[in-house]
Image (tube, grey):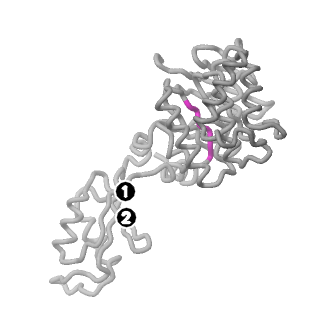
Amino acid sequence: MAGNIIELVDLKKKYGSFTAVDQLNLAIRKGEIFGLLGPNGAGKSTTILMMLGLTEPTSGMAKVCGIDPTTNPIEVKRRIGYLPEDVGFYYNRSGYENLMLTARLNRLSRNEAKQKVEQLLERVGLSDAAEKKTGKYSRGMLQRLGLADVLIKNPEVIILDEPTLGIDPTGVKEFLELIIRLSREEGLTVLFSSHDLHHVQQVCDRVGLFVSGKLLAEGDIQTLSKKLFTKSPFIIEVGVSNNAPDAQDGSGGQDAADWLPQLLQKIDGVNAVHKKNEIFQIECSRDTTTLIAKAIVESGAGLNYINRKEYGLDDIYYRYFEGGEENE
């Protein structure tokens, strides 16, 4: 697994008879943003604790930056920056003072610490709030300060555990944009653990779907879509005039829901036609966009709208976690 900065092999963690993480195999490449996605209680945080050397696996192996966190936890902690769900700061001290304390604990000289802290405060957009007590910071500001805090030691990997929880939309946008910049500009590897589909899809190169201690699937959105929706990997959305086209069989005046499925299912590759509000969704085994448009126009009906829809993470998540009998 050359080029991987995180490797988990048959990793298992049991608490008595309860299995929190079950035979987890995962490889994360250097420089990528990987999203560990799953509901609360799926085992994401337990996995992170094993990667940090804060709890030992029952069996299996973890390697971070080529180091086993079970046998050498201190060295792993030197290489990883960890931002937990709730960041702890001295609220009676300023953001600058909190970061200076972290810098000094990481054995930076006072001059080095001052330069580093000022640079990071600017990097995360908190220069104007540097002297403000952190007890007055918003949740979003605390998370950005937390990110600056983990970057003090120049980590190779940063692990973010539910980092956007409780942040307002503007704060979330700023935080996610910052994560992308850090990864792209500085080559940082980011493990983004969350249950928020939208946020994971916005920033992650690949995702792993985690539930009940098991990794069900991993890959980019396109790869997961192909795995899950093998029978109908394409969805074409169309909007048409409600009345039926003029027809020799006298079908004019019918509602589109009556005549459109019959018309489109004659096309090779069309598997099913569903109406959702005023839009028809056509499940296809191949891209039939052109053929669908041609059939509707030639029928004499009005084609008001056509679009090839990409499957999103919400579609994938639903198929795995809620549409179990449909999993493929």
Figure label count: 2
Q: Residue at x 67, y 26 (%)?
A: 12
Mark 2 residue element: strand
Packing grade of label 1 (10 A; few <14, some 14-19, many >=20) is few
Q: Residue at x 77, y 48 (%)?
A: 136
User: Viewer-nearest of labels 1 and 2?
Assistant: 1
Q: Tell me the amino acid under the disc marked 1.
A: Lys
Mark 1 residue element: strand
Nearest the eye: 151 or 35 = 151
The correct choice, above or below, for 123 with respect to 168 in the image is above
- Asked if residue 192 is among those painted magenta in the image, a careful observer would answer yes
Badge 1 vs badge 2, beta-carbon distance below 8 Å? yes
The tag on residue 281 is: 2
Spot occupied by residue 147 in the image (x, y as percentages of width and height): 64, 34
The correct choice, above or below, for 201 with respect to 304 in the image is above
The correct choice, above or below, for 313 with respect to 256 in the image is above
- In the figure, is residue 98 to the left or right of 1? right
- Mark 1 = which residue? 309
Q: Residue at x 35, y 76 (%)?
A: 257
The correct choice, above or below, for 94 with respect to 115 in the image is below
Q: Which stretch appears magenta? A: 190-195
Packing grade of label 2 (10 A; few <14, some 14-19, many >=20) is many
